[in-house]
Image (tube, grey):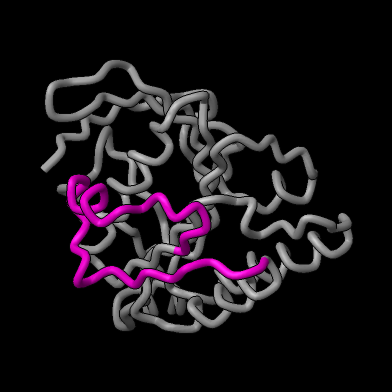
């Protein structure tokens, strides 16, 4: 008797599936983001990185709790609502000093109901005086915490080039949005995919229409 065939026929094998952030109906160009991942959304010289991140936050709210870790204090309620974010379902956390911010992130990632955490400036994770060893330790622990969680983390990079090798190694994917054009009640954004570890086409791009509410 072929035992492998017997097992296939009589025992149901459980297939592991990756939990995704967005409902399929909300995906643009079939782009969906997996949980348990670190993403960088980097400015290309305009504020489109902020628009795209807020849109993704609104979409992710359909599948879990979203957190906004705010260091620039530019996330005004009217701006969040305009992008479709439900304020009553958003956990807003003002930033502290960098070491405390890491601790906040570790704690948040232990909450299984959280699906997305947005850090609205990567600089909130860098002390004014820091060394590469400290950064490597903190960021490696952050990546391990994300992988052990049910959430993903969006790191917004408004203007800083992070050239540390450890950063590029640990971030799963880098997105570089840029305005294509502005509309009367919204914007159209083209996003390049770089530093990719998620199976998207390297050097590819996708376009997103954001219609303000």
Residue 160: x and y, percent? 65, 37
In the drawing, does residue 88 fall left or right of residue 54?
left
Residue at 51% over, 32% down: 43
Reply above or below: 63 against 55: below
Report if residue 120 is visible in the image: yes
Q: In which quarter of the image is residue 211?
A: top left
Q: Nearer the viewer, residue 113 or 128?
A: 128
Reply above or below: 212 against 148: above
Residue at 41% over, 28% down: 191
Specify start and end residues of the magenta stretch as a single range.
69-97
Looking at the rendered image, the quarter that the C terminus falls into is top left
Q: In which quarter of the image is residue 59?
A: bottom left
Q: In which quarter of the image is residue 49?
A: top left
Residue 131: x and y, percent? 88, 57
Looking at the rendered image, the quarter that the N terminus falls into is bottom left
Let me know if residue 94 is in the magenta part.
yes
Residue 109: x and y, percent? 50, 76
Residue at 48% over, 78% down: 108
In the drawing, does residue 142 fall left or right of residue 54?
right
Residue at 40% over, 50% down: 74
Report if residue 17 is visible in the image: no
Residue 149: x and y, percent? 49, 75
């Amino acid at each position: 008797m072929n035992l492998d065939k017997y097992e296939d026929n009589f025992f149901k094998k459980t297939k592991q599936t990756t939990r995704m952030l967005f409902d399929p109906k909300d995906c643009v160009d079939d782009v969906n983001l997996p949980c348990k991942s670190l993403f960088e959304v980097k400015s290309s010289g305009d504020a489109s990185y902020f628009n795209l991140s807020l849109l993704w936050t609104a979409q992710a709210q359909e599948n879990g709790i979203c957190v906004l870790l705010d260091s620039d204090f530019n996330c005004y309620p009217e701006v969040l609502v305009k992008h479709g974010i439900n304020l009553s379902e958003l956990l807003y956390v003002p930033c502290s000093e960098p070491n405390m911010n890491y601790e906040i992130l570790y704690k948040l990632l232990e909450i299984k109901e959280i699906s997305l955490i947005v850090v609205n400036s990567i600089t909130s994770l860098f002390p004014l005086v820091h060394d590469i060893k400290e950064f490597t330790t903190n960021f490696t622990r952050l990546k391990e915490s994300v992988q052990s969680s049910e959430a993903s983390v969006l790191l917004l990079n408004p203007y800083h080039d992070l050239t540390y090798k450890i950063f590029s190694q640990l971030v799963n994917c880098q997105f570089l949005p840029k305005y294509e054009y502005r509309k009367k009640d919204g914007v159209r954004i083209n996003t390049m995919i770089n530093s990719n570890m998620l199976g998207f086409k390297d050097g590819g791009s996708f376009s997103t229409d954001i219609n303000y509410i």
